[in-house]
Amino acid sequence: MASPYYDTINIEQAPTDNIWVTVEFNSFGMTKESFCEQFVEEGDITLTFFGPPGVGDDALLAQAEADAALLYGKTDPNNKVVLVNRSAPEDFVLTENGPRFGVTFRFGYEFRT
């Protein structure tokens, strides 16, 4: 992806990149699919892109959409993780510690064991 990734889970970050991305995973549950101990976990992956004022929401959205499309087009070579859907972009503005533009994409996934 064109956007640099920053881990923000329990880590305070201060990126200097104009546009950057972080990720969050949410598991909704796991179901047993067979007597052979095959399970399917369902959840979502949220990519959140940020950009400072001056970058503009058009530039942020264009880069975020390109990166989201790239991720959605990927396949797991082991066929264990499948991205099953993708949301439309949701934009927002953060005003804490100075204004920043943001846009999120949610990807539904299934993980098979």
Image: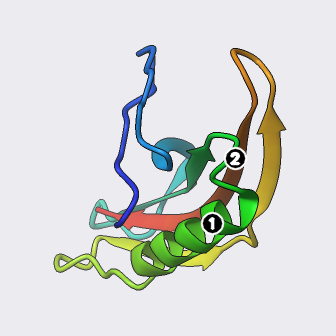
Q: Position of residue 93 (x, y in %)?
A: 81, 39
Residue 77, horizontal then vertical, whole percent: 17, 80
Q: Is residue 39 left or right of residue 85?
A: left
Query: Mark 1 belongs to which amino acid?
Result: Ala
How many residues crowd around disc 1 within 10 Å: few (fewer than 14), some, or many (20 or more)?
few
Q: Nearer the viewer, residue 6 or 15?
A: 15
Q: Pick the quarter of the image with the N terminus.
A: bottom left
* Quarter-of-image position of residue 7: top left
User: Which residue is depicted at the point 41% across and 73% down?
Assistant: 71
Q: Check disc 1 and report the residue beneath it.
A: 59
> What label sits on residue 47 in the rendered view?
none
Callouts 2 and 1 close, C-beta under 8 Å: no
Q: Residue at x 46, y 70 (%)?
A: 67
**If the image is split into quadrants, where does the C terminus sit?**
bottom left
Q: Amino acid at mark 2?
A: Gly
Residue under the image location 75 percent in, 72 percent down: 88
Secondary structure of residue under mark 1: helix
Q: Which residue is denoted by mark 2 in the rendering?
A: 102
* Residue at 56 percent of width and 43 percent of height: 26
Q: Disc 2 and disc 1: Cα gap in Å?
A: 11 Å
Q: Secondary structure at mark 2?
A: strand
Quarter of image, res 73: bottom left
Q: Nearer the viewer, residue 10 or 30?
A: 10
Mark closer to the chain start, 2 or 1: 1
